[in-house]
Amino acid sequence: MNTFTRPRLTINLTALKRNYKALCAKRPSATTAAIGKANAYGLGMAPVATALYEADCRTFFTAYTFEAIDLRRLFPDHGVEIYVFNGPAEGEEDSYRANNLIPVLNTPAQIAMWQNSDLPCVLHLDTGMNRLGLATKEAMALLDDSATLSKLDVKYLLSHFACSSDPDADKNHTQYKEFCDLTKQVASLFPSAKTSISSSGGLFLPKELDENLTRPGVALYGISPQGSPLNALEPVASLEAPVVQTRTIEQDETVGYGATYTATAKRKIATISIGYADGYMRSLSNKGFVMIRGEKFPVVGIVSMDLITVDVTEASTEIQTGDVAECFGTNILIEDLAKVANTIPYELLVGLGNRVERIYKD
Ligand SMILES: *Cc1c(COP(=O)(O)O)cnc(C)c1O
């Protein structure tokens, strides 16, 4: 009996650990945190965080408080620091205390709330992303408010690059300079506060940045933050799905919903058990590709909810039910598939559905 009947994502935990070490080596004087938000980019928070812990990672970030609480359950008492990007909502202070979590404070309202607590925090200074964090004006106003400042126990001053996926972008310099200026100004107010600006992209900028903590996410998971090539990172996740049927169609026959593909000659079609419900994006219709038995074949027709169809006419050996199709992994790079899908690897990875079985390999 063939047990490979649904899509599976194989996560190579050894490659993950090597990537973590490689990222540590890029900024040896800094602490390297790991970003575990969105279920560790879809790969599964618990096994991923456990592997990273084994690679000596002791600092994690999540987006939400509830994600941080889940993570804390894994490391109740292991010297692991857990930070929450979005910071606390009203009434969550007890939860931060009970779970030993540290919030990133992004708004004057969050700061006003936190000044009455004795718990540590991170201050997010927005240096040009204009998304989350204190605008420069708000940061300046805070600097003049010594009553509030004196009540905050600031562990880190944090900022985030808008364009670090492009090593040549001028905005990287502007933001870095703004961050250095701001952190210098507050240095006397928070003598023990450290700094953090780089996510994955920042670690691959040509200029070495001066900071105490880096925050890579996607690079850990083997994805180049700057599109292609892999920058010496190893692919971590590999998505495969089984061939469930093959058929031969004649000239002028069509394939799939909307009959968007018409055979110009006799073709052999393989149907594969993965679809947009699994995160194989519909934008890959008539554009995607898979690898079966070491050869690459195009997706023909529309991606449906549970299935895709590929043209295997040119296969050098006969493709059969039960064959394994690689959608991305070590042969088909997720960067290349994302480009064809008109998106970025992040979206492909976090979009993988619950139906995709996760398999962890050491
Ligand atoms: C998600 C996130 C990161 C990690 O980004 P990658 O590009 O995946 O490395 C770092 N910092 C902040 C503020 C984030 O939101």
Image (cartoon, rainbow, N blue to C red):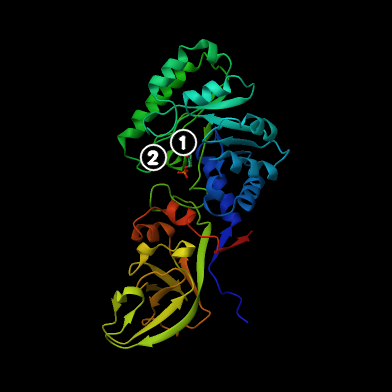
Density class for disc 2 (Cα within 10 Å; few <14, some 14-19, many ≥20) is many
What is the total number of numbered labels drawn onto the structure image?
2
Q: Which residue is mark 1?
A: 198
Displayed quadrant of residue 258? bottom left
x, y (%) of residue 80? 66, 37
Residues 117 and 1: in front is: 117
Asked if disc 2 and disc 1 are in contact, CB closer than 8 Å, the reply is yes
The local secondary structure at tag 1 comes to loop
| Residue where numbered disc 2 is placed | 164
- Residue type (three-letter) at the residue carrying disc 1: Ser
Disc on the earlier residue, 2 or 1: 2
The quadrant of the rendering that contains the N terminus is bottom right
Looking at the image, residue 123 lies above or below residue 160: above
Q: Can you give x and y, in whole percent of width and height, for residue 146 in the image?
A: 51, 11
Q: Determine the residue positioned at 51% across, 68% down.
A: 240
Task: Please tell me which residue lies in front, 209 or 122.
Answer: 122
Q: Nearer the viewer, residue 63 or 320?
A: 63
In the rendered image, the vertical position of residue 333 relative to residue 164, given as above or below: below
What is the three-letter code of the residue carrying label 2?
Answer: Ser
